């Protein structure tokens, strides 16, 4: 079990190309760092068996989602396979105000949208930390995709083409982790989390001594 650093809470966003290991890193942060929760996002897709509203997703009808989007309720939205997804501003604000650390995994455009929305938000802005997970090279990324065994060659090429565009955005992030292995990558991400908790505590004038 990893010792939890002092308050205040952070919104830690992890992004990177497919097969970079970002999802595993986020899952470990939630599993091994007390007080860290994943962000529950919203969607218009149908509820699947075993899913619970508010635990897995916030489920909305399309018209409800569009109404919320028009009101500016989301920090970011995206459309995937005909369904809408989004991150509710109120969910983030409530969790951060309650000193709950949050971690989420979204794409590069989503990070840009969150950063833009958070810029004028006194609660979210100072607590937002973005991390890009960078594979050593495209050959390594290709091999990981091949090893997963879930895509044919054409699909792998499409994923690599998308990855090229995402890789070009690494300098937009607060931190970049060049992958060296699951354990080392997690230690690096945890170190970033710890250091940023202390930095934000100083920034906000809070007691970082615990």
Image: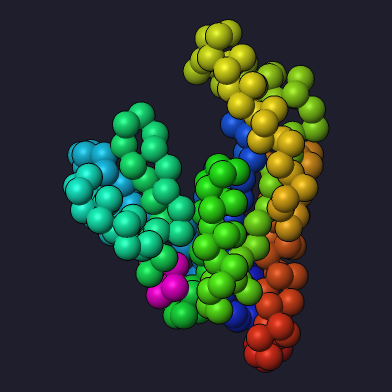
The count of marks equals 0
Specify start and end residues of the magenta stretch as a single range: 91-95
**Residue 100 magenta-drawn?**
no
Q: Residue at x 40, y 59 (%)?
A: 74
Residue 55 seen in this snapshot? no
Q: To which quarter of the image does residue 5 belong? A: bottom right
43 or 183: nearer the viewer: 43
In the image, 143: left or right of 80?
right
In which quadrant of the rendered image does the N terminus lie? bottom right
Is 50 situated above or below 28? above
Q: Residue at x 27, y 50 (%)?
A: 66
Is 44 situated above or below 13? above
In which quadrant of the rendered image does the C terminus lie? bottom right
Is 180 situated above or below 4? above
Q: Position of residue 14 (x, y in %)?
A: 61, 50
Residue 119 seen in this snapshot? yes
Q: Residue at x 32, y 57 (%)?
A: 70
Q: Position of residue 154 (x, y in %)?
A: 55, 9
Main SS category, magenta section? helix
203 or 103: nearer the viewer: 203
210 or 18: nearer the viewer: 18
Q: Position of residue 157 (x, y in %)?
A: 61, 14
Q: To which quarter of the image does residue 138 belong? A: top right
Q: Position of residue 123 (x, y in %)?
A: 53, 77
């Amino acid at each position: 079990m990893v010792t939890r650093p002092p308050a205040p809470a952070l919104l830690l966003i992890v992004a990177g190309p497919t097969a970079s290991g970002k999802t595993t890193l986020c899952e470990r942060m939630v599993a091994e760092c007390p007080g860290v929760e994943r962000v529950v996002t919203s969607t218009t897709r149908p509820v699947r068996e075993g899913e619970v509203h508010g635990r897995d997703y916030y489920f909305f009808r399309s018209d409800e989602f569009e109404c919320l989007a028009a009101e500016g309720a989301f920090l970011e939205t995206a459309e995937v396979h005909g369904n809408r997804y989004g991150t509710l501003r109120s969910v983030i604000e409530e969790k951060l105000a309650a000193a709950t650390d949050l971690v989420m995994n979204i794409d590069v455009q989503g990070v840009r949208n969150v950063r833009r929305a958070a810029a004028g938000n006194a609660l979210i802005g100072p607590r937002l930390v973005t991390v890009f997970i960078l594979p050593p090279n495209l050959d390594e990324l290709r091999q990981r995709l091949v090893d997963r065994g879930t895509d044919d060659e054409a699909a792998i090429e499409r994923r690599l083409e998308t990855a090229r565009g995402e890789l070009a955005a690494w300098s937009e992030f607060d931190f970049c982790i060049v992958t060296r292995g699951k354990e080392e990558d997690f230690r690096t991400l945890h170190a970033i989390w710890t250091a940023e908790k202390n930095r934000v505590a100083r920034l906000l004038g809070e007691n970082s001594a615990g």
